[in-house]
Amino acid sequence: MSTAKEILLQVQDLQVSVEGRKILNGLNLTVAAGEVHAIMGPNGSGKSTLANVLAGHPGYEVTAGSVTFRGENLLELAPEARARAGVFLGFQYPVEIPGVNNVYLLKAAVNAARKARGLEEVDAFDFLGMVREKMKIMRMDDSFLSRGVNEGFSGGEKKRNEILQMLVLEPALAILDETDSGLDIDALKIVAAGVNTLRSPERACVLVTHYQRLLDHVVPDVVHVLVRGRIARSGDKALALELERRGYDWVAGEAA
Amino acid sequence: MSTPVNALASRIAEDFAAATAAGGRGLDTRRRALRELQAAGLPGTRDENWKYANLRGLERLRFVPAPAGATAIAEGALPAALPGFSRQVFVDGRYAPALSGAAPGGVFAPLAVTAAPPGSLTLGPDQRFALLNEAFATDGALVRVPARASARLELIFLATAEAASGSSYPRLSVEVADGAHLELIERHVSAASLGSFVNGSAQLHLARGAQVRHYRLQELSARSRAFDTLGAALDQDASYRLHAIGVGGAASRSTVAVRLQGERAAVTLAQVLLGARQQVQDCFALFDHAAPRTQSEQLFRGIAASRARVAFNGKVVVAPGAAGADSRQSLRGLLAGPEAEIDVRPQLEIYTDAVRCSHGATTGKLDEQMLFYLLSRGLSRDTAQRLLKWAFLEDAVSGIELPELRRQVELALAAALEDETLKELL
């Protein structure tokens, strides 16, 4: 990791509670442009809490610490402002919103970000062409265009839709919360291809995952293991493999 | 005696005497309606099915029909025409041939010129405002679709009178013969921002195998009060779909009673009510399964914003002889203002075994998970909330199969939600 790279995300001593219960307990994380970080850990270690807090979910209380995105205080921004600034959360359980059309949402999202940057709205025709291109990467058929957001989608389709939204929005920082869970191997490869499409020196990605199999297809620069609300160990791809072999108890035991 | 109820009764009696002083057609029927109304009395808020309606100040109304022809009608007061539909216009309940198109032969006639005006169906205890209509109405629409024929008709009821000068009595009598098809649009609109009193009545009979799609839109001016009573009787294999949209008026109450009296008869009601400001929007719908294997569905979507009150009371009765009946209710209310009120009430009375009844009723605020999802995509809170309101109504609007009408309905809903941004969706 070169020090010349722009620091996109800096999390320092982050402490977060949910309904009075402390979930994150002094978490530190630095993500630079161009990097892919994997956050692994056992159930209940705080992985999804981290993802949701970064996106601004209202159900979490930050009790201490700081988070900056491109040097700005991220915690002060409303969720929609974070999104427009280039932070994207891929949901673990994307909601169905019948009656809100998929394409309408994509267009509204892109235009909201463009407006924030002082750009004019996208041309509807060009936009649809662009969406169709990205749909090819995600192997989604045309019927998607006329459906409601995630309406009647299978679990795998919902996850692919999350990645499609990410491809259309082109965020600087994508946080993908267990995007791999519940996917069969074919869907996993499609999702991985989508994530890899967006890899570039300007962008970064935080993959929150329970299993290392996604990391066979999206190779991370750094792997962190989260235990009881803080990062217990960091390493490279080899750490994920070792975890797979030895189980989380190995790290949890060391951290205790 | 000075109780409000009696003040109302004497007001009605006086106005009836004034309205009929010069004689007129069908007086016997009208007198009988008045007597029945006097015996029953108009409902009060202590009546179980009327507690959400705004019944205040009725005794201060002028029940005589609004004077005819005083107001010049601007064409702009009428909604855009729908292709393929014969349009017939009524002004304050009276047929206005000058504003109407060619009537489809043998299907439509104004009630004022028919030999024997049909009387009310007697469908349950909540037809009292229909009796008031019958006592005072002097005209209306008579629709007769002959066996195996099909017709498309648009009826516009335009209110042009201030309540102080008289009331408007839209009246509609529909007979659809064996195997006939009818697509009927019924719209209630105002000529200007008047405060009219409108009390409509619609009676339908669907004979064996008849199919009716009925679109009812209440878009009266913000100061108007509207009551309407609809009764429908369905014979064997008849199918009735009623799409009702209520956005207008200061206070409105719609009373719907459908009797499934023939085997396998089927009815669907998709009702949308929007309340803003201090509007009161109230609907009571009674479905009566009186024959075997009958089907019914009630779909309600209501939004109460600001200080509005929106209520839907959906009652389904399955009679002892109605084995194999199938009834579904999906009633949902959305609270969109801190001082708004919404009341959604499903009622089910089942007097036989071997029926399938499912009902769901919810009221609440916008779904927080959905809201956060849209925010996390960069949409403003305002846009996200508007989109979710729109999505909430979608189920009840998507069944409108006429694209042009659906577009007009969506525009009316967008206007009622005071939502300019939604128009880009349409």
Image (cartoon, coloured by chain):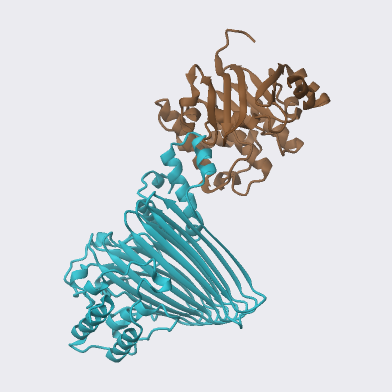
In the image, is A232 to the left or to the right of B146? right
Q: Is residue B393 above or below residue A18?
A: below
Please identify the quarter of the rendering in which residue B309 is found.
bottom left
Image coordinates for residue B401, horizontal then vertical, percent: 49, 61
Quadrant in which the N terminus of chain B appears: bottom left
On the question of residue B376 being in view, the answer is: yes
Report the residue that reaches farthest toward the bottom: B28
Q: Is residue B244 above or below residue B263?
A: above
Q: Which chain is cyan?
A: B
Please identify the quarter of the rendering in which residue B318 is found.
bottom right
Q: Report which colour depicts chain A.
A: brown
In the image, is A234 to the left or to the right of B385? right
The residue sitting at 69% across, 30% down in the picture is A209
Image coordinates for residue B311, horizontal then vertical, percent: 42, 63
In the image, is A254 to the left or to the right of B232? right
On the question of residue B142 being in view, the answer is: no
